Each structure stands twice: as C-alpha cells, then as structure tokens.
Amino acid sequence: MSKQMIVAGLDLGTNAVKCVIGVRHEDGQIDIIGTGTHPAAGLKAGTVCDQQQAVTSIREAVEEAELMAGCEIKEIYVSVSGRHLESFNSHGMVRIRSGTVDTDDVRACMDMACAVKLPPDKAILHAVPQSFIIDGQAGITRPVGVEGVRLEVHAHLVVGDIQALKQLEQCIRQAKLRVIDMILAPLAQAEALLSPQGRDLGVVLVDIGGDTTDIAVFDQGQIVHSTVLGIGGQHVTSDIKDCLNTPTVEAEHLKQAHGCALAELIDADERVSVPGVGGRKPREIERTLLCQIIEARAEEILRLVAEELRPLGYANGLPGGVVLTGGTANLPGLVELAEQVMGMPAARAQPKGLHGLVDVVRNPRYATGTGLVLCGVNRRDVQWFSTRLTRPRKRTWGRIFGRSRRV
Ligand SMILES: Nc1ncnc2c1ncn2[C@@H]1O[C@H](COP(=O)(O)OP(=O)(O)OP(=O)(O)O)[C@@H](O)[C@H]1O
Ligand SMILES: [Mg+2]
C-alpha cells in the first residue's frame, strides 16, 4: 500500500483566497499537485466581512485546487493574518519535579508563560517557545532529558480576536471543510522560506500582500516579533489610479506588466500607454513616472518595516537580512530598493525542498499556502506547535472554538 500523505493549506488573503494541495511521497519528496485561487470577496484584512461571499470564495478556491490535484479535500490547515493579531514575549518558570525535564514539565512551563491577563475578547493562538533556561543556563532549545531543578522558558505569544477567529472557522465549516489548525501566516511561511541557519543568524520575513504587510523577525532560531501593518500592494495600485487618472483595473495591469519599485533601473526613453477613464483616449507617459509612483509607496512600506525593527534593537539590520514575500514581492526592483532603504541584504523568497507545480512553488504569492502544506507534512517536527505542547484547552482553545478540542 502506498504511504502517500496529502495535505492542503488555505491562505485567506484580502486580495485572493489561495488553496494549495501537496503530497508527500514514500521517499519523502514533497510535490505541490494542486492550486486554486479565487478573488477574496467577503474578507477584509484577515477578517470576515460577508460570511456568504467568504464561503463561496473558499469553496471555489478549494474546488479548483481539488480538480487540479485530482483528489477531494475534507480537512485543511488555515493561515491567519490581520490587524486583530498581536504578539508579545512572555516568561514561564516551574520546578522540575523528577530532577530530569520531561514533556509534562515543558508543558507546565509553557502554561506559566501563557498565564497572562488578556481582554475577554482575545485568546492565545500560538505560544512559541523561544529558548529554555535550566538552573540559570540559557539558550537550551530541547530541554527534555536535561537534569536540573528549575526550568524557565522565554515564549512568544500570538493573541487574536476570538470573534474574528470563530467567524473564519465557521466560514470554512460552511465550505464543508474541517480546520486541522489555524496558523499565523508568517509562521507557516517560515516553514517554506527560511532555512534553520537563516533563522539562527537573524532574519526578517516581510509579506507584502494586498491590504496588509506581515512582519516576522526570527533570531537565534525562533520568532521574536510579529506584527501586521495595514498597508500593502493595493495602496500602490490606488496611487497609480489617482496619480495617472486611470481605472483601478488598468492601474493594476500597469503595475503588474510595467511596474518596477526602483525607478532608476528604467531607461529614460521607455514609454507606456495609460488607458483613460470614461471613454477618454489612452495617453503615453514615461515608464519612469509610473515607477516613481510605485517607488514612493514601496519605500514607505519598507521604511515602516525598518521602524518596527528599531525598538527591537535591530536598527542596523539583521545579519540574515530581509526576505520579501507576498504578491507585491513580484515587483522588479523591490529587492534592490529594500537593500537601499533598510540597509541590509535582501532577497525574494524562494521556497525550499518543494517540487511539482513550479510556477506555484516559485511565486511568493503562494508562500503561505505552500508553507501550510509543509507545516502539515512536518507536523511532528515543528516545534512552535506549542499550543499542542501546552494543550491550552478550555481556557484558550476552548474559548476560540467553544469547546475543548484535540490540537
Ligand atoms: N507581478 C506582480 N507585480 C506587482 N504586484 C503584484 C504582482 N502580482 C501580484 N501583485 C500584487 O500582490 C498583491 C496581492 O498579494 P497576495 O496574494 O500575497 O495578497 P493577499 O494574501 O491576498 O493579501 P493580504 O496578505 O494583504 O491579506 C496585490 O496587491 C497585487 O497587486
Ligand atoms: Mg497574504
């Protein structure tokens, strides 16, 4: 009997709902075998604004992926993003009961780190252990089996709005799917895009999507900061529309077909045609002008990211630099602009260790979906599934899902 494992991921973006299906073969190779994309009607900045439309978008994206993959999906990993998510670092400490750390001690210690006072409408989505300390010895990543008296943990907590998470789950249930887990989008992406060495060195992952820009900072192997900015590629499109007085759909086409985030890379004599509104004739403009509009907004986004890093002590950048992902990362010149603005090495995200549909694997737009597939495949090895570690039960998960569930 074949031991293939099929895993599906659902990225609920503001621009598009993207479903990615992958298969892990017996020899360990992972192929992406199906993908479906549908405009994200009913979703805004990671939350549901029209339930019926959201259900249709999800169903359409999943059906398209199922058709391509030739299989039916019943359960799925889902990414969460949005401005309702907040993150902060916490600390927990317990006595090691038997003198040697076991999984119950780790769980109890993570529980202590999760014991924070939250507003009644918020719940913990993830608790990621950053590092453990045993009897004052810091920097331990795998504490089980180590002897000692006192176990401490530094943990990164991601907190979300209960109602927003509940509504997402309801929509997915109505689309006839069971949610296996909800995973913070940058954590999922990190699985596909960041090497363990990069995470150790220190790297910032920047997902510039449609409405939002998600930032996640990794250092010494673990996530140390995550946040969501309410700005993205749609703001670039809207600038083009306003400055060049052209319909949104044409502005989007101009951006994708002729855009560049660094105007100095464009030949001064290149020209592009801009369709007019209300039946007016198209006119020719210098392509540099289009790219200057894009550059101004792209620079603003990157400066906001750099500002996020400053209070964290990364004013001079991170050794592993910045990894750009999300649909807007397709813009030519963005890598060069990021290096100029942020003063650190930059690269466009390239998922590792995946085969199959090459266009999907290579396109940063699908990085969350492919990351979710990898999270599912590597489920046992993914350390930050700490909500499982701590089994936060009725108090946290129970509050999100209305009952205690196996996580
Ligand atoms: N080739 C391209 N060049 C420039 N921009 C692009 C290109 N392809 C997609 N985009 C932009 O990427 C954005 C959508 O990216 P993505 O699919 O990652 O967003 P999303 O996940 O739906 O949104 P969010 O993450 O904000 O919720 C849109 O603004 C789109 O214009
Ligand atoms: Mg996105």
Image (cartoon, rainbow, N blue to C red):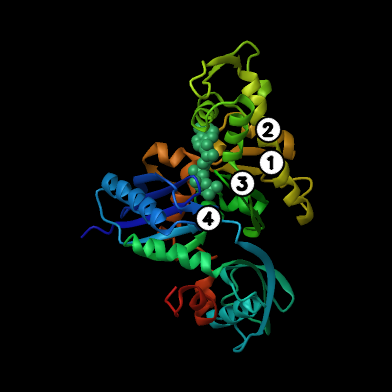
| 369 or 198: nearer the viewer | 369
Horizontal and vertical percent for residue 195?
56, 50
Q: Residues within 10 Å of mark 2 (few under 14, many from 20)?
A: many
Residue at the image point whose x is 36% and y is 57% from the top = 7
The residue type indicated by label 2 comes to: Leu
| 238 or 327: nearer the viewer | 238
Cα distance between the residues tagged 4 and 3: 16 Å
* Residue where numbered disc 4 is placed: 46
**Residue 351 in sight:** no
Cα distance between the residues tagged 2 and 1: 8 Å
Is 394 on the left-hand or right-hand side of 90?
A: left
* Residue where numbered disc 3 is placed: 206
The residue type indicated by label 3 comes to: Val
Q: Is mark 4 within 8 Å of ligand 1?
A: yes
Residue at the image point whose x is 26% and y is 55% from the top = 72
Q: How many marks?
A: 4
- Which structural element holds mark 4? loop
| 85 or 381: nearer the viewer | 85
Residue most toward the top?
269
Marks 1,3: beta carbons within 8 A: yes
The quarter in which the C terminus is drawn is bottom left
Horizontal and vertical percent for residue 257?
50, 25
Which labelled disc corresponds to residue 302? Answer: 1
* Residue where numbered disc 2 is placed: 337
Mark sitting earlier along the chain (4/3) = 4
Cα distance between the residues tagged 4 and 1: 21 Å
Q: Quadrant of residue 5?
A: bottom left
Cα distance between the residues tagged 4 and 2: 27 Å
Q: Residues within 10 Å of mark 1 (few under 14, many from 20)?
A: many
With respect to residue 250, does 229 lie above or below?
Answer: below
